[in-house]
Amino acid sequence: MTRTLYHGTSVEFDGNNIDLNASSRPKDFGNGFYLTSIYEQARNWSKRSRQILNNKNSIIKEYIYKEKESFETLNILILNEYNKEWLDYILKNRNKINDCEDNYDIVIGLMADGKIKQLMRDYISDFITEDELLEELQFEYKTDQYTFKTKNSLNMLTFIKDNYDKDGSGSYGK
């Protein structure tokens, strides 16, 4: 079984030559190559990247993920519920002081809402409880992220094509 995944960016790179060290930190699931199964979500990532880096292009890179094979051969963590395990893993990765080292090749799960930095400060300072933090971090709509953390995991991806939005019009040619 395979699945189509998307990577949204504004940075040109060879889709067959992914550099795991190019990942910016801190991220929900730590250092790695981030993709989503939701095209619109990748589109939002590409627009955000374009704005932050002041680049001209928004690019959605399209991949085929060998899902069945990866589950048979790799160490995969699934965090598909907003619960304590999900929260603890994200807090460990987002906390620059306590970088989360793990043995996972791939981490699949829900995204945290973009307001995580302030909410983490509030939680660490005991201004909000763990339950309040969990509730605040949930998106109103379903989101997902697939983080490929090792070279072995990247072997489960086949690059298909780049979809460009050069003028910001939102027409990507998908």
Image (cartoon, grey):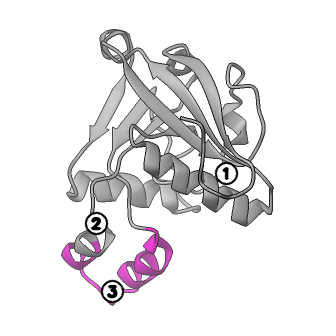
**Residue found at x 75% / y 25%:** 14
Q: Secondary structure at mark 2?
A: loop
Does residue 163 appear anywhere in the picture?
A: yes
Q: Residues within 10 Å of mark 3 (few under 14, many from 20)?
A: few
Using the image, determine if residue 151 lies above or below residue 40. Answer: above
Task: State the image quarter where residue 38 is shown.
Answer: top left
Q: Which residues are magenta?
A: 114-133
Q: Secondary structure at mark 1?
A: loop
Task: State the image quarter where residue 68 is shown.
Answer: top left
Q: Earlier in the sequence, mark 2 or mark 1?
A: 1
Location of the N terminus (image quadrant)? top left
Residue annotated with mark 2: 138
123 part of magenta stretch: yes
Mark 3: amino acid: Asp
Disc 3 + disc 2, Cβ < 8 Å? no
98 part of magenta stretch: no
Residue 97 image offset from top left, x and y in percent: 57, 62
Locate residue 88 relative to residue 22 in the image: left or right: left
Residue 173 image offset from top left, x and y in percent: 59, 37
Residue annotated with mark 1: 24
Q: Residues within 10 Å of mark 2 (few under 14, many from 20)?
A: some
Residue annotated with mark 3: 126
Nearer to us of marks 2 and 1 is 2
